[in-house]
Image: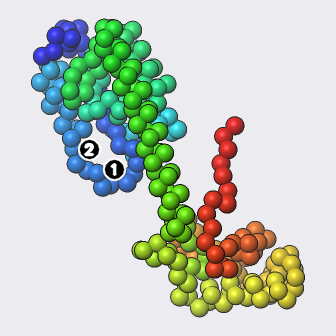
Amino acid sequence: MSEKIKPHHLGRKAVLYVRQSSAHQVAHNQESRKLQYAMKKRLEQLGFREIEIIDEDLGRSAAGAVKRSGFERMVADVCLAKVGAVAAREVSRFARNNREWQQLVEVCRVVDTVLIDLDTVYSPRQSNDRLLLGLKGSLNEYELDLLRQRSWEARRQKARRGELVVVAPVGYLKTEDQRLEKDPDRRVQEAIGLIFGKVLQLGSVRQTLLWFLEQGLELPVRERNGATRWRRPSYGTVYRILTNPVYGGTYAYGKTECTLR
């Protein structure tokens, strides 16, 4: 048992926080989740008898962009002095942003709750441990920013080679080797060709739309799940098809950007 764990800590419950950042990790990184649950044995070896596992944040990032009900419930229990220790296999599971991380460390300091990971026990009331926890929180945030930057640069390099296909527009299908092929459905092909033919004949998007509406024709629309659905045409549908560079045989990426204010 660690000397930092006192009898009053053991008299309260211990909370084991289990989290993975995305649904893909939940589905495919099952070994990581098993290792996190195995931390329960470490808490039992340290002398805790009442152990609560909070795992409702599986599939949610700790970067601060999404609400984590499990983390909030854990912090609330710590504030009420119900928790003697909060544990995770790595402290980065708690938070990847300094705001939530410092909040957790501060409330643990106030009510004298220890933090436990696979390596050691931290007591926020000790200045050295508080300094180490602060450094780990900063490193966790920096590591996340570094991963984002690497991912973004890799994405840009792939786009420069024309190999980054995010979503296939209606009339095309994305292959496994990241290429676009025409949809084999002849009805879809003919509908796309009819749009371009009519805009050349009538001279405007509006007149093309009115012609389709007068004829009672439907146009294919690509759903979020990749399926093609036929709907009554709208101005936006016709305009997006006519202005998409893909239909002219040109690859384009980065036509829009997001600005935070």
Look at the image and tell me whether residue 235 can be seen. yes
* Residue 178 image label: none
Element under disc 2: helix
Neighbour tally class for label 1: few under 14, some 14-19, many 20 plus, Cα within 10 Å: some
Q: Position of residue 163 (x, y in %)?
A: 50, 69
Residue at 68% over, 80% down: 248
Residue at 61% over, 63% down: 253
Compared with 145, 175 (above or below) is: below
User: Which residue is disc 1 drawn over?
Assistant: 26
Compared with 35, 176 (above or below) is: below
In the rendered structure, are the residues bearing label 1 and label 2 in contact, judged by CB atoms less than 8 Å apart? yes
Q: Earlier in the sequence, mark 1 or mark 2?
A: 1
Quarter of image, res 104 = top left
Compared with 219, 79 (above or below) is: above
* Residue 33 image label: 2
Q: Position of residue 87 (x, y in %)?
A: 27, 26
Q: Quadrant of the N terminus?
A: top left
Observer-nearest of 242 and 186 = 242
Q: Left of 37 or right of it: where is 95?
A: right
Quarter of image, res 252 = bottom right
Residue at 54% over, 69% down: 162
